[in-house]
Amino acid sequence: DVFVFNVKKDYNNYEFIMPRPCGNIALRSITPLPRPEAVCAISVTPAKVNLKDRVTVDMSGSQNAKSMEVVVTGPDGAKVATHTFTPESPRWQTTFDKPGNYTFRALAINEEGKASTNPCEAKVYVNAPPICQLTTSCVICKNFVGKPVTMDAAGSTDPDGKVVKADFTNTDAAGNPVDSFLDSEPPLTWDYIFSKPGSYAVTVVVTDDFGAVSEPCRVVLDVTQKLNYFSVEGGPLFA
């Protein structure tokens, strides 16, 4: 008669035998054990970003994984990126240059090369920047020195939010700053009085409710001053 006992270690089953009542232990067989299935876990932060903001993909929560993979699809469903992770390097950062919803579909692979079967997906929304629009009460501003000129950014729009402020800048013909104004209350206008004649460039950028900034809008104004004509009447001068 012999005793038979098993030791499980490193995904192997070691079967030993030992004669009764007491004798030398002998290894009878080694049987590989099935590797545990990989469990995929993915976290993508933040869930909403602006264009070119960094997004962090974290798969450190995956279990029993030799490697992990993620495929990123864009708003139109086309693949835009892929990345392979390891337990030693489970994080990755990326950026996007187009607005819309991005989907991260991931899986984990165990030691036997078997992919995980649990759902493993995350989404990120990339905020669309606002679109500025600038109009002025005049472009050829004849006789407008000392009179207010209205600069209006109220027509600016945002595709997925709202415009919350407008930054106006006024420069002279040489590009030197003359004045600036920040308006965070509707209707996002600036009434400005030019004190000197000349050519001026008015630029505005608008910001949406998620902090995205538009491309600048620019209007060039030619401001003139009213000329005062007068005559002098007199007679002969006597010494």
Image (spheres, helix red, strand yellow):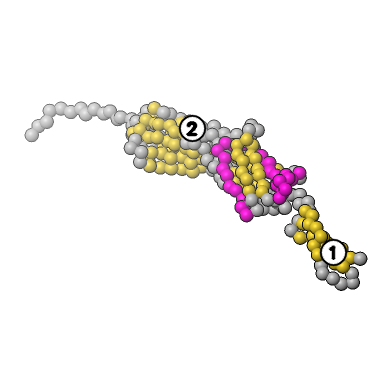
User: Considering only vertical position in the picture, is 229 above or below 169?
Assistant: above
Name which residue lies at 82% across and 63% down.
Answer: 16
Judged by depth in the image, the label closer to the viewer, 2 or 1, is 1
| Residue 88: quadrant of the picture | bottom right
- Residue 6 point in image, percent of width and height: 83, 61
Q: Please tell me which of labels 2 and 1 falls first in the chain.
A: 1
Which residue is under mark 1?
A: 17
From the top left corner, tell me how far across and down residue 171 is, in percent.
38, 38
On the question of residue 214 being in view, the answer is yes
Dot 2: what SS? loop
Residue most extreme to the bottom: 22
Asked where in the image residue 51 lies, by quadrant, the reply is top right
Residue 106: mark: none
For the N terminus, give its image quadrant. bottom right
Mark sitting on residue 134: 2
**Is 43 on the left or on the right of 135, as rendered?**
right
Q: Which residues are magenta?
A: 88-117
Q: Are marks 2 and 1 in contact (CB under 8 Å)?
A: no
The C terminus, quarter of image: top left
Q: Is residue 184 above or below residue 217?
A: below
Q: Amino acid at mark 1?
A: Ile
User: In whole angstroms, how far apart are the C-alphas of marks 2 and 1?
Assistant: 89 Å
Residue at 62% x, 35% y is 79
